[in-house]
Amino acid sequence: MKTKYLKIASLALVVFFVNCSKDDNPAPADPIPVVTDAEMETDIKADLAIDEAYEPIYASFQSSIAGKGNSISDIGLKLSGTCAIEPVTKANDTYDGLVYISLTYDYGTAGCTLSNGATVKGMVTLYYRADKPIVFKFTNYDYNGKIINGTVAFSKTVSGTNQAKITNTQSLTVNFPVLGEFKRVGSITRTYVKGYDTKGDYTDDIFNTTGNWTTTFPDKTTNVVTITKELVTDLSCPIKKHKSGTIQFTRKSNVATIDFGDGLGCNVKWTITRNGVSKEITRE
């Protein structure tokens, strides 16, 4: 009987010490997922391509209302390009439960060319009322093969003849032909320093940009983007278009920065730094 009790006691001690050992040595935390340089470069280029795709919309707003134009119809000068599209106008349209004036530009399915040479298809509807930001709604808007759906809301303040500050709030889905679907939510502010007073032409615009946004990638991971040094952008440059400034990208706890240059010329190569290692990438 004593032997039996000793065996039981010994077994209890073994269980106790095993449990203590497990408690004292918890399972290691999951490692930080690795994002390769190639993946990060693809992410950055995709993010920047989203900006490029709705640039004509941004520029068309810049020409509107309290600046270059005398009426809401002046916005269309930059939206129509060589398409020569007449918008469908509704004086009492409804958006988000309120009554707006709306202009719808239907580029059709065959495609036509904007003044910057881009080929576009699909629809853009502009909603305007005096007490609210102007909203651009994209419906299967195809910009050089990138299909955009969603909204961008713009508000603007003007100081002087050639200066304006424009803030946009984005909620967009962009589908790339090879890469898949990207979602973008965020807020960006541009301060124009040149070209704001050139009606109908946005290729002479120069502006500074601040802001932040989050992009969700096809694999459902997110890229948190912050402009850490304001971007200086010159739309007269042949390849888009940033001349200086720094953006930080954070994906899966991996951080990269991209430096757009010293502002002295139109840059087609930028510097990306990750884990203390820098390399040049070429804007495509």
Image (cartoon, helix red, strand yellow):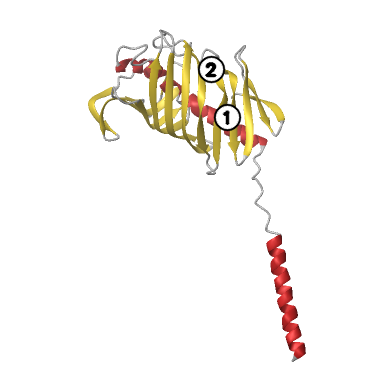
Instruction: Give the labeled residue for mark 2.
Output: 233
Q: Residue at x 43, y 9 (%)?
A: 162
Where in the figure is residue 248, as x and y percent of width and height?
59, 30
Where in the figure is residue 270, as x and y percent of width and height?
64, 22
Determine the residue located farthest toward the bottom in the rendered image.
Answer: 1
Q: Is residue 10 visible?
A: yes
Locate residue 265: give its quadrant: top right
Locate residue 198: give its quadrant: top left
Q: Is residue 259 left or right of residue 93?
A: right
Mark seen at residue 153:
none
Where in the figure is residue 43, as x and y percent of width and height?
58, 34
Q: Residue at x 45, y 23 (%)?
A: 119
Q: Nearer the viewer, mark 2 or mark 1?
A: 2
Q: Amino acid at mark 1?
A: Lys
Q: On screen, 89 above or below 147?
A: above
Instruction: Give the labeled residue for mark 1.
Output: 45
Marks 2 and 1 sit apart, C-alpha to C-alpha, by 16 Å
Locate residue 61: give its quadrant: top left
Q: Please count the marks in the image.
A: 2
On-image quarter of the N terminus: bottom right
Name the element at disc 1: helix
Q: On screen, 77 above or below 250?
A: above
Q: Earlier in the sequence, mark 2 or mark 1?
A: 1
Q: Amino acid at mark 2?
A: Thr
Q: Is residue 84 visible?
A: no
Q: Residue at x 30, y 18 (%)?
A: 72
Name the element at disc 2: strand
